[in-house]
């Protein structure tokens, strides 16, 4: 079973060698460079002869990833970024692919672990080639059809220094290329503005999202993000009310109970913390506290 690793890259010379070392035993490595000027290509060609420089970047991650996929010849494809390091061996990938094949799955989850914060989330990153699977969404892209199998595979990720060259990129793409009336777009706009420290903008988009939210893991992530914004704005009473709603939706969300403790003085802080000890993070989108 041939497995291809597929990347899209631009100006990743400081970090890409570490990534490529972690996937050098894959059957094939396919890299689409979207305009590097820092020598990224010179590093890539030491690991693979399949480096393509003919794609013109169009503010659309799904389009670029689908172009890269079209160059891969593996039976299964694995998507990884230059600032990621694969933790699982090719033998472990073959084992998981065999299990997926046996179960009739064509798209699989892989655990992604942040290098410094250790935040975990599951992403659809491994899929069977030739089954019509495609990336959708110009940014915060996902695979369609969605994953149906959770593997035991993992990788760590950081954030490339190249992101600093275009800090508003994701917000720009979300507003320019996505339908801002869709809950998914509103959710990610809320998260992006929060990460930029623009808390009022974040609350505005999260409120739009929460009017239509239905998927509990995502809804709770929106609620805790909104509460953190309110706390930063010295609106503690509102933050506590939002966190109560979050905990009502998922009392097993450990971070939510711990943050509720932060929002209170003693003895309530210790009581919330004790409750958090029993949480297992079932149905949590981003796990930041084990």
Image (spheres, rainbow, N blue to C red):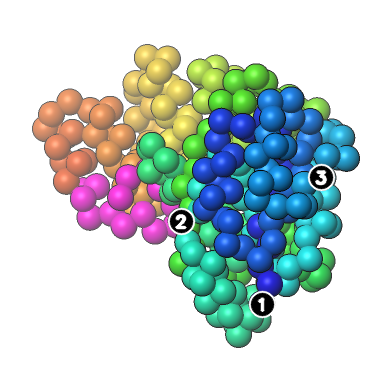
Q: Does residue 151 lie above or below 1 as drawn?
A: above
User: What is the spatial separation of the Cα atoms under label 1 and label 2, in whole angstroms?
Assistant: 20 Å
Q: Percent position (x, y) of residue 245?
A: 41, 41
Q: Percent position (x, y) of residue 254?
A: 31, 47
Residue lying at 54% horizontally and 20% vertically, measured from the top left: 196
Left or right of residue 29: residue 67: right
Q: Earlier in the sequence, mark 1 or mark 2?
A: 1
SS for dot 2: loop
Residue lying at 76% horizontally and 39% vertically, measured from the top left: 33
Q: Percent position (x, y) of residue 287?
A: 40, 48
Which residue is the site of mark 1? 1
SS for dot 3: strand
Question: Label 3: how many residues lie within 10 Å, few (<14), some (14-19) or many (20+)?
Answer: some
Question: Looking at the image, which residue sits at the far bottom?
Answer: 102
Residue 89 is inside the magenta segment: no
Question: Looking at the image, which residue sits at the far front?
Answer: 46
Residue lying at 29% horizontally and 35% vertically, measured from the top left: 260
Helix, strand or loop: magenta stretch = loop
> Residue 181, can we see it?
no
Residue lying at 77% horizontally and 47% vertically, measured from the top left: 51
Instruction: Give the number of callouts.
Output: 3
Question: Looking at the image, which residue sits at the far top?
Answer: 234
Q: Earlier in the sequence, mark 3 or mark 1?
A: 1
Question: Label 1: how many residues lie within 10 Å, few (<14), some (14-19) or many (20+)?
Answer: few
Which residue is the site of mark 2? 87
Left or right of residue 30: residue 217: left
> Residue 41, can we see it?
yes
Left or right of residue 111: residue 62: right
Which residues fall within the magenta stretch?
A: 275-290
Which residue is the site of mark 3? 52
User: What is the spatial separation of the Cα atoms under label 2 and label 3, in whole angstroms?
Assistant: 26 Å
């Amino acid at each position: 079973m041939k497995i291809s690793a597929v990347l899209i890259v631009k100006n990743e010379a400081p970090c890409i060698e570490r990534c490529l070392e972690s996937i050098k035993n894959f059957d094939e490595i396919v890299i689409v460079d979207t305009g590097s000027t820092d020598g990224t290509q010179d590093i890539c060609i030491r690991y693979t002869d399949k480096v393509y420089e003919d794609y013109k970047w169009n503010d659309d991650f799904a389009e670029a990833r689908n172009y890269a996929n079209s160059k891969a010849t593996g039976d299964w494809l694995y998507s990884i970024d230059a600032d990621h390091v694969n933790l699982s061996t090719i033998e472990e990938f073959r084992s998981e692919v065999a299990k997926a094949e046996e179960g009739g799955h064509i798209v699989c989850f892989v655990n992604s672990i942040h290098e410094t914060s250790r935040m975990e989330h599951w992403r659809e990153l491994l899929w069977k080639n030739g089954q019509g699977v495609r990336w959708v969404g110009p940014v915060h892209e996902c695979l369609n059809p969605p994953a149906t199998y959770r593997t035991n595979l993992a990788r760590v990720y950081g954030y490339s220094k190249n992101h600093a060259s275009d800090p508003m990129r994701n917000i720009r793409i979300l507003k320019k290329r996505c339908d801002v009336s869709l809950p998914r777009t509103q959710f990610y706009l809320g998260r992006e503005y929060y990460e930029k420290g623009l808390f009022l903008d974040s609350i505005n988009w999260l409120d739009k999202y929460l009017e239509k939210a239905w998927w509990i893991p995502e809804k709770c992530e929106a609620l805790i993000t909104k509460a953190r914004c309110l706390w930063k704005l010295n609106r503690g009473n509102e933050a506590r009310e939002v966190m109560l709603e979050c905990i009502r939706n998922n009392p097993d969300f450990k971070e939510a109970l711990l943050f509720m403790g932060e929002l209170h003085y003693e003895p309530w802080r210790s009581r919330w913390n004790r409750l958090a000890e029993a949480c297992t993070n079932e149905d949590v989108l981003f796990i930041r506290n084990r």
